[in-house]
Image (cartoon, rainbow, N blue to C red):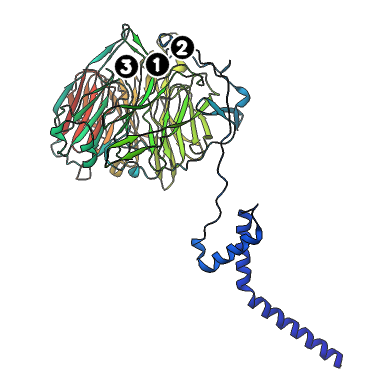
Amino acid sequence: MRIKRVLYTLIFLVAVSAVLLILTSKNDSNTKATNDITDVSASGTNNHETNQTNNQTVQNESPDDITLPSEPAFVMETVSVPLSHDLVDPRGVNPDILPVYTGSNAFSEYAREKIFGNIRFKYWHFHGFDIITSGVPNPGIFFGAPEDYTDVEGITTFRGNHYRNNADFGTRLVSEKKLEIVWTKDISAINNGSSYWPGVGWTGQPLIIHWEEDIRKLMNINESLKNTDLVEVIYPTLCGNIYFLNLSDGKETRNPINIGFSIKGTGMIDPRGYPILYTGQGLNQNGENYAHHEYRIFSLIDQTELFSITGTTPEAFRIWGAFDPSGLLDKNTDTLIQPGENGLLYRIKLNTQFDREKGELSINPEVIKYRYENPFDPNIGYENSPVFYKNYLYLADNGGLLQCIDINTLEPVWIANVEDDTDSTIVLEETDDGVFLYTGNEADIRCLGKPQPTSAACQLRKFNALTGELIWQKEYDCIYQYGVNGGLLSTPVIGKNDISDLVIFNICKTEDAQKGRMVALDKKTGEEVWVRNLDYYSWSSPVDFMSDDGKTYMIFCDSSGKMHLMDPANGNIIDTISVGLNVEGSPAIYNDMVVVGTYAKKIYGIRIK
C-alpha cells in the first residue's frame, strides 16, 4: 500500500511539474519560433551570431519593425548571339512583307515555350541585342485605379489611362445641346506619289494638358504665355509635324517639332507631369525621302530628342517597324511600355533624372524586349495600344493573337485566337462581377486571296480578363477593302453612370464600302439594346462625357467629315457639324472643348454648348 501511495504521489508531482513547465515556457517558445524563421532566411551566416542579433532585435523592437535579411541581388543571365545586322534599305520595307521565323536571327534553341491546350507558344526575351537565358528583372510594375494613372490635369495618352476608357477631362454643362467651331489651325500633308497623307490620321488623338506653373515656366513656350493658366494641345500629325496649340484659341504656343515623316498614332505625355513627349513614326516615306521608323522621346523643355528606337531591327521577326500604339508609363517604377508593329514589346526602364528647380532633364534607358511567334497566323505586330490590369498587359496583334502578359516577368498568362487583324484598342472594365475585356476585329486576313469584293464577320467579344474565358460574341458582316478595312477600327465606349449597362461599338463598311453601323450592346449578355445605321462609316473613336446635370452624351466623327453629338442611351443624334473631310483621328475633350484633326488639313477646336 505504501508503495502505491508513493507511486501515486510521484505521478501527481510529475503532472504538476509538466503543467508548470508548459506555462513558464510560453515566451521562450515564441522567441525560438521567430529565430527559426530568421535563421532560415539568413542561411550561410554564423548561426550563433545571428541568434544573438535576433534575440536582441526581438527584445528591442516590435515584430512589425523587424527587418529580415534581404534576398540575394537578382543577376540576369544573357548570351550574346551573332545577329545579322545587314543594312536594310528603307525603300524595300513595307507592311506587306511577312515575318520570317527561320534563319540566322531566329535562335530557336533559346526559345521559351508555354503550353496552352494543344498550342505550343514560343517567345524570347532580349536585353539590347543579347538573349536573356535567366528570368528577367522584376521591376514591380503595378497599375492601380485608372483615375490615378496621371498626376496632372488632362489627357496624356490614347483614351486617357491604362483601361483606355476615357478621352475626356473636366466638367461642362450641356444646355443648348449644340456644337460650335471656335477655332481652326491649318496644317499640311505628305505626298508619297501613290499615296497621300493629309492632316491627321488613325488613331490621331490629341494630347491636352494643363501644365503646372513651375513646369510651364521651364519650357520654351512663348513668353507671353508663361504667366498664363495655359492648357496646351499637343498633336502629332500625318504631315510630320508635332503641333503645340493653345486650347483657348488654337494659336501656336511654340514652334512645331518636325520629324519629317508621318505620325499616324497617338503620342503620350509623361503622366508624372514631367515635360517629356513620347511619339512613334507611322510611315517611312516622305516624297522621295525614305528612313527607318523611329520611336522618339523628346524633352519639352527645349524640344530636343532624348532617345529613339529604330523599328527595323535584326532581332525582330518582322521588318516593318512602325510605332502606331500609344504607350503607357508606370510612374512608380519609371518604366515605359511600348509595343511595335515589328512584333516586339518594349519594356524600358528610363532612369529619369529631373530637377524641377534647375530645369535639368535626362534619361538613360535600359531596354528589355519580348518577342513571340504567332501560333495562329504568320502575321504579327501591334497597332493597338496596351491595356493594363495591375501587372497584366493585354494586346492583340495583326494576326489575330490576343495575349495576356505579366509585365513583371514578361511571361504569357493566357492567349486567345480572335481570328483576324485587331487594330482597335481593347477596353478593360473592373466590376463586382469580375474584370473584363471588350474587343473586336476586322475583315482583313480572312479575306486575302479571295475574289473581290468579299466580306467577313466583324466579331465583337467580351473576355474574362483574368482567365481568357470568352463570355459572349456578336457578329456583323463587313466589307473587305485593301488598305481601308471594314470591321472595328475605333475603340469601343464603355458605358458609365447612367449608361453603365452598355458597351458601344462603331463598325465600318457594314452594308457596302461607305456605310457603317453603331451598336449598343448589353454588357452582360451581348444582346443589342439599340442599333443605328450610318450613311458613312467611321474609324474615329467615339468619346462619352457627362454634363454637370448628370446626363451622359457622346461625340463621334465619320468619314464624310461630320462630327455628331449623340445621346448614347438611345442612339439619337442631337446635333451635327462639318469638319471638312474624313475624320480618322479620335477626338479628346477638355471641359467644354473638343479637339480633333481631319483630312481637311485642319485641327478643330469645338465648343459643346
Residue at point 68%, 78% (across, down): 21
Which picture quadrant has residue 269? Answer: top left
| Neighbourhood count class around disc 3 (C-alpha, 10 Å): few under 14, some 14–19, many 20 upward | many
Mark whose residue sits in front, 2 or 3: 2
Between discs 1 and 3, the one toward the N terminus = 3
Give coordinates of residue 55: x percent, y percent. 59, 66
Q: Is residue 67 left or right of residue 608?
A: right
Q: Can the viewer see residue 116?
A: no
Task: Find disc 1 in the rendering and name its residue.
Answer: 292
* Position of the C terminus by quadrant: top left
Amino acid under disc 3:
Phe
Local secondary structure at mark 2: loop
Local secondary structure at mark 3: loop
Q: Can the viewer see residue 9?
A: yes
Residue at point 64%, 74% (across, down): 25
Amino acid under disc 2:
Val
Q: Is residue 300 left or right of residue 392?
A: left
Task: Find disc 2 in the rendering and name its residue.
Answer: 88
**354 and 500: which one is in front?**
354
Between discs 2 and 3, the one toward the N terminus = 2
The reply to whether dot 2 and dot 1 touch (C-beta < 8 Å) is yes
| Neighbourhood count class around disc 1 (C-alpha, 10 Å): few under 14, some 14–19, many 20 upward | many
Which picture quadrant has residue 298? Answer: top left
Task: Find disc 3 in the rendering and name its residue.
Answer: 261
| Neighbourhood count class around disc 2 (C-alpha, 10 Å): few under 14, some 14–19, many 20 upward | few
Which picture quadrant has residue 48? Answer: bottom right
**46 and 319: which one is in front?**
46
